[in-house]
């Protein structure tokens, strides 16, 4: 079903490209925009994961450079019945994470260094399980492709506004301004419709994978608090990628934040607490209950609240 939805999304965005092109340059502009849209769709399908990772300067890690994190993802992947995804680290103090890839065989998960510093092991496991749930549900294709194309639409509208058609085919300046403003908003509305319900589903499945809904609920609260106080310049420069993250990484100060791409964090936490009651979960029943202490400190401990210097999982 997600594959069908992805096809419908690509077709809808192709139509949007055509409409934008028509208003900006008449029939010629529409044909150019459709050609640009087709090329963008093909490129986004095959390369959107690489674009998302590169946009946030993610670096791939392995058992040598980040053993604890990679082993955690491998264990969770086995529990989820998924192939081992590629694992990336983003050198960014804001706690956050996302998953990407067109299918489970070509998937990747990325976490910021801020996430590893601020959260406990159970909380990190909950976040990674949430991202694996997106991969299992094949959300990553539609989310990453929509983010890539939404950014392309915004670029197209801005380019068309500056370099619209000439002569008789040149549209009214008011129409050009409206198109330049509304096209990116239309793309953001599509992203909003895609990601809101999917986050609840990924929370539910992620809690089932890790076996600890309360740890994921705690992680969401910590990440939201970190996002509120720690800016993410890469995300601010590329707001179309905000829907990929487990919590919206944007500061909320720009026009791109008029449309939230995530459900309210409080509602997600409440749903996880309700799920914990159904599962009979307790804060001590985490995924790593039997694990030895690693770079995040003792079980249940938070690096952000500890003293002394700890070795990070990236070296």
Image (cartoon, rainbow, N blue to C red):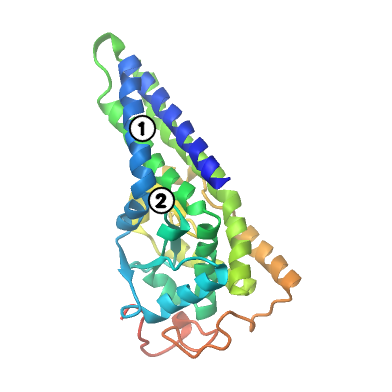
Let me know if residue 222 appears in the view.
Answer: no
Which residue is under mark 1? 37
Q: Is residue 300 above or below residue 173?
A: below
Front: mark 1 or 2: 1
* Callout 1 touching callout 2 (CB < 8 Å): no
At 50% from the left and 43% from the top, the residue drawn is 191
Specify few, some or many for label 2: CA neighbours under 10 Å numbering under 14, 14-19, or 20 or more: many
Residue 211: percent from the left, percent from the top? Answer: 63, 74
Let me know if residue 33 appears in the view.
Answer: yes
Mark 1 vs mark 2, CA separation in Å: 19 Å
Quadrant where the C terminus sits is bottom left
Which residue is under mark 2? 241
At 32% from the left and 28% from the top, the residue drawn is 35
* Left or right: where 225 falls relative to 175: right
Q: Label 1: state its secondary structure.
A: helix
Q: Is residue 58 above or below residue 147?
A: below
Residue 312: percent from the left, percent from the top? Answer: 36, 81
As drawn, which residue projects farthest toward the top? 168
Residue 282 sits in quarter: bottom right
Q: Is residue 30 above or below residue 231?
A: above
Which callout, 1 or 2, points at the residue further toward the start of the chain? 1
Residue 230: percent from the left, percent from the top? Answer: 40, 64
């Amino acid at each position: 079903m997600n594959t069908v939805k992805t096809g419908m999304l690509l077709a809808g965005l192709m139509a949007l490209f055509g409409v934008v092109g028509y208003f900006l340059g008449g029939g010629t502009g529409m044909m150019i925009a459709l050609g640009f849209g087709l090329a963008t769709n093909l490129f986004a399908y095959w390369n959107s994961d690489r674009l998302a990772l590169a946009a946030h300067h993610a670096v791939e890690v392995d058992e040598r450079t980040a053993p604890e994190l990679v082993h955690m993802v491998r264990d969770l992947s086995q529990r989820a019945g998924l192939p081992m995804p590629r694992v990336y680290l983003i050198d960014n103090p804001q706690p956050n994470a996302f998953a990407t890839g067109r299918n489970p065989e070509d998937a990747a998960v990325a976490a910021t260094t801020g996430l590893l510093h601020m959260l406990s092991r159970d909380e990190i496991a909950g976040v990674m399980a949430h991202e694996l749930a997106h991969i299992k549900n094949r959300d990553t294709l539609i989310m990453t492709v929509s983010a890539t194309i939404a950014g392309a639409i915004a670029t197209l509208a801005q380019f068309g506004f500056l370099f619209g058609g000439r002569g008789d085919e040149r549209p009214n300046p008011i129409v050009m301004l409206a198109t330049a403003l509304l096209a990116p908003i239309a793309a953001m509305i599509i992203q909003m419709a895609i990601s809101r319900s999917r986050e609840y589903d990924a929370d539910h499945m992620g809690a089932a994978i890790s076996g600890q809904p309360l740890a994921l609920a705690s992680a969401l609260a910590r990440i939201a608090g970190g996002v509120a106080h720690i800016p993410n310049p890469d995300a601010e420069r590329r707001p179309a990628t905000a829907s990929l993250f487990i919590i919206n990484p944007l500061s909320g100060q720009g026009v791109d934040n008029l449309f939230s791409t995530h459900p309210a964090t409080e509602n997600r936490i409440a749903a996880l607490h309700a799920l914990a009651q159904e599962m009979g979960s307790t804060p001590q029943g985490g995924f790593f209950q039997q694990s030895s202490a690693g770079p995040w400190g003792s079980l249940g401990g938070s690096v952000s609240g500890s003293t002394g210097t700890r070795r990070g999982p990236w070296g």
